[in-house]
Image (spheres, rainbow, N blue to C red):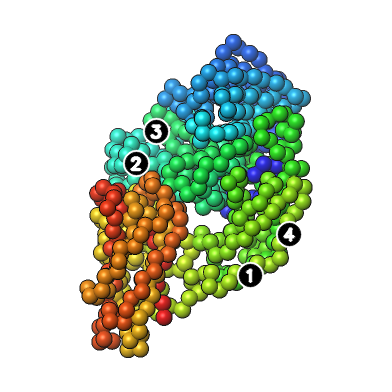
Amino acid sequence: MSGSESQRPVRRRTFVLGATAAAGTAALAGPLAAPASAAAFGYTDDGSNYVVDTGADLVFKVSKTNGDLTSLVHRGVEYQGYGGMNSHIESGLGTSTVSVKQSGPTILVSVAYGTLKHYYAARSGENNIYLWTHKADTSVSATRYILRVRKGLFLNDQPDSYTYTTSTIEASDVFAKSDGQTRSKHYSKLRVMDYDHIGWSAGGVGLWIVRSNHEKASGGPFYRSLLRHQSADGGGLYEILHYGQNQTEDQRFGLQGPYVIAFTDGGAPSSSLFPGTLTTSWADSLGIAGYVGAGGRGRVAGVGITGRNTAYPYTVGLANPDAQYWGSARASDGHYSIGGVLPGTYTLTVHKSELAVYSTQVTVSAGSTTSLNSIAIPSTNDPGNASAIWRINEWTGSPAGFKNADLMTYAHPSDVRAAAWTGNVVIGSGSETSAFPCYIWKDVNSGLLVHFRLTAAQAAAAHTLRIGVTTAYANGRPQVVVNDTWTSAVPSPPTQPNTRSLTNGSYRGNNHTFTYSIPASAWQTDTSRYNVLKINVVSGSGTTGFLSAGTAFDAVDLLA
């Protein structure tokens, strides 16, 4: 979030690859970084580029033609350049108007391409580049910034990388290694709320992109997107501003940033660059389109949240068509505080893990705090509070706990590490959740059987079966059969993203609960025998295998 009032994400994770310097000796990037005495802060014009010397260990060039970052030299080593391409917005802009100005210890390079505005800023004595992107409309397909890094400088064989192989198993972006493990740039593992920065470290140098607050991005705190990749040609680090893959929200417009390209001596970038910590008052007077400083923002704070299941984390989100924010609710009492919020009216949503359990409207004004009384989550808002004869998994809005659920955020379903997608589930076995697959596909494991017993009293009554899902591919949805005698109607498909999801590391779509009213006549009358519930995935769309119609599960229960 822009300005000093921003809210920090819930968790911090760092991707560090290669030989990382010890934390005690690694120099941090940021405002406290010591300038190199031999360097001179300033800029020159070489005819094709504006050349900016930060007065530290970093010199970079911005094309005067199209605003590409054409050179990134740190301690005399060129880092920019992947496959002969520059670093830039989306796939690069056409002929643009590029200008530069120096304001004391700050140099700003401005790029204008139609309605799109993009900015690079340097601060005297820092090994950082601050970037902003202002997208006003759909006339320019600017949804990401990609930092292209020369090959051989860092080595990466983590899940979110290519594997220097031509063994493509899906589309042109999912690969198989010779050992059966899979790799893809989509497999980042991380939701937006889980990371502040992404990058590599090797040979006493760390190169990172510190993400922005994502206030003008889409998808909320639980959204996953590609963050980096590497192949034989080099690597890429991304700041994704809007990504169409498994997207649940419309694109937002306006100024996004700052996000930061940061060099270090091998350690993580300074926390002073993180969203919620970064102070950019020095940018207040630079004339950046759409820029709103800390004084033009407000805060939302709540004294607590009752009615929580304290076994799970709670996240409070703010969203409207123009901006999004989020913050964690304190485990002890549910207190939350979200700063750096643009003025406006927002939907405030309380999430139990990733499941929305409460919402209301709040209005934020510049320079003030909107204080809220304690929120009481009604018991009926959490489906986990309903009395159930049996329940498989807790209602959290995610497949966490189901078979292969964790692996699917960083591997393809065909990965050798995945447990068999087929198999049956027995209620009372103690392994119901771990035996239930997180995803079911029409062409892979449809027809999952769940075995359970009912007492005489339970078998004499009708019951409601609930199946919670988190996303679907190709309109896949569950149809159920009980004891081969009763079959549910085919439910209508809920609104879900229409792109790949289950095979590219994301289960995050729109949470939906299917309900089935099962009559007493469907149950076994012999209480010593199992009832058998069959769950099929049905759809008229999709292709074959793991690209057939499918759905991701949250929880399944039979209500008392």
Which of these two is toward me, 247 or 127?
Answer: 247
Mark closest to the chain's N terminus, 1 or 2 = 2
* Label 4: few (<14), some (14–19) or many (≥20) C-alpha neighbours in 10 Å: some
Residue 493 located left or right of residue 281: left
Residue occupying the far bottom of the picture: 456
Q: Answer above or below: position of 166 versus 307.
A: above
Q: Answer above or below: position of 31 versus 395.
A: above
Q: Quadrant of the N terminus?
A: top right
For badge 4, the amino acid type reads Ser
Residue 547 shows in this picture: yes
Q: Tell me where residue 181 appears, x and y as whole percent.
A: 33, 47
Q: Alpha carbon of mark 1 to alpha carbon of mark 2: how far?
A: 45 Å
For badge 3, the amino acid type reads Ser
Going 51% across and 59% down the picture, which residue do you hit?
Answer: 354
The picture quadrant where one finds residue 53 is top right
Secondary structure, mark 4, is: strand
Numbered badge on residue 376: 1
Discs 4/2, front: 4
Secondary structure, mark 1, is: strand
Q: Alpha carbon of mark 3 to alpha carbon of mark 4: how far?
A: 49 Å
The residue pinned by badge 2 equals 174
Q: Tell me where residue 470 appears, x and y as whole percent.
A: 43, 58
Residue 556 located left or right of residue 524: right
Residue occupying the far left of the picture: 484
